[in-house]
Amino acid sequence: MAGLVSRRVRRRRLRVAAGIVAAVTTAHDPTPALPVFADVDTGVDDAMALVYLLASTDADVVGIASTGGNVDVDQVCRNNLGLLQLCGATDIPVSRGADQPLSAAMRTAEDTHGPAGLGYAELPRHDREPTSYDSAEAWVRAAHAHPGELIGLVTGPLTNLALALRAEPTLPSLLRRLVIMGGSFDYRGNTTPVAEWNISVDPESAAEVFAAWGAAWGEQDPDHLPIVLGLNVTENVAMTPAILARLAAAAGTPTPEMSVTDTRGTRSPATNPLIGTLEDAMRFYFEFHHDQGEGYLAHLHDPLAAAAALDPGLVRTRATTVDVELVGALTRGMTVADWSGHWGRRPNALIGTETDPTVFFDRFIDRVGRYARRF
Ligand code: BDR
Ligand code: CA
């Protein structure tokens, strides 16, 4: 734990040097922080998830793996490094992931997240590089550095985690907890009629990850099964202009509530750089959801997963066996939950079934609003 504390203190010093944190604030934070490793395809909602983690005094982000998904892997690296620069968290290592899914052709989603992945937001320049080792190795290093303690969070395709499991099959027992945003359970897909994006991009990697946890089940108790949050639960968490305005107000930088009648691409008037960035990113995400017929709102899939990674009590879950359809002409990438035990296989996941969006948003606004006041 001493190492974790010194990392937090080091990070605060960097923020002080960058003028982000007032030098008069105390560097002592008694909250015990849990080491968190985040594997992301940043992405608007991934960025919101990372900011939530950085804003959480009960989390110490020890590494970030970049996975190609919403945008290609090099752009994901740029986004992660730019976001950390903005937040003054430049001591957090960022690793580059695989160029391609395990066997599928790479796909990206600029229509959903914008040409560079952060909607209309522009991140600050930086001169940092990804680590010399790749994202799969970063997973293994982080797990060995914090045996039994590390919380893993995946909010993108599972390519890097599958590669890490090939290199280190004991990962399921090395981690304290794993939370995955992916899949859709007894609910429609968002990429095909039945498949969710993160699983659909690399179904083979998802199948390998679920199989690995299933194989480890004999040594594990149910608490060690991955918490898997699909669209059936994450689509209950809808950011709206009113909630976003609450966030800006909580940060001490009130901004006018966005509206569907605003000119598309209108930039945030916020003088606070973090709030301005999040608003510029969210506006694009609102417009995308609106164009999909879902209203002028945006689902915060990945921030819910980040919040559940720190506090699993935020979601109700049910243990079951999950597998991924790999061959169906119409159903490839579908996550199938065997609720009734037809397969006779051990549970390999805790599937999210319910959450309270009010509790989530209150916590999100409290943490991120308070954090943004420092900028
Ligand atoms: C998931 O797909 C991505 O576009 C989002 O970042 C999220 O992780 C939702 O299906
Ligand atoms: Ca994502």
Image: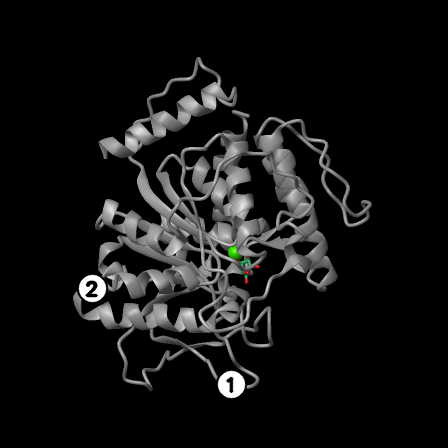
Residue at the spot 51% in from the left edge and 79% down from the top edge: 332
Q: Circle 1 sits in a helix, a strand or a loop, which is it? A: loop
- Rendered-image quadrant of the N terminus: top left
Beta carbon of the mark 1 residue lies under 8 A of ligand 1: no
At label 2, counting other C-alpha atoms closer than 10 Å, the crowd grade (few under 14, some 14-19, many 20 or more) is some
Nearer to me, 323 or 139? 139
**Labels 1 & 2 near each other (Cβ < 8 A):** no
Residue type at mark 2: give it.
Gln
Who's the residue at 44% across and 37% down the image? 54
Q: Which residue in the structure is indicated by mark 2?
A: 220
Q: Is residue 242 above or below residue 163?
A: above
Quarter-of-image position of residue 210: bottom left
Residue at far top of view: 24
Q: Nearer the viewer, mark 1 or mark 2?
A: 1
Query: What crowding class fits label 1: few (fewer than 14 Cα within 10 Å), some (14-19), or many (20 or more)?
Result: few
Q: Which mark is residue 261?
A: none
Q: In the rendering, at what x and y percent does residue 100 appear?
A: 50, 64
Of the residues under marks 1 and 2, which one precedes in the sequence?
A: 2
In the rendered image, residue 121, in percent from the top left (x then y), is placed at 66, 41
Q: Residue at x 30, y 66 (%)?
A: 166
On the image, the x and y values in percent for residue 216 come to: 23, 68
Instruction: Report whether 270 appears left or right of 131.
Output: right
Q: Nearer the viewer, residue 6 or 127?
A: 127
Horizontal arrangement in the rendering, residue 341 relative to residue 1 (left or right): right
Can residue 178 be seen in the rendering of this structure?
Answer: yes
> Which residue does the numbered mark 1 point to in the structure image?
328
Q: Residue furthest front?
A: 132
- Residue 289, quarter of the rendered image: bottom right
The kind of residue on which mark 1 rests is: Gly
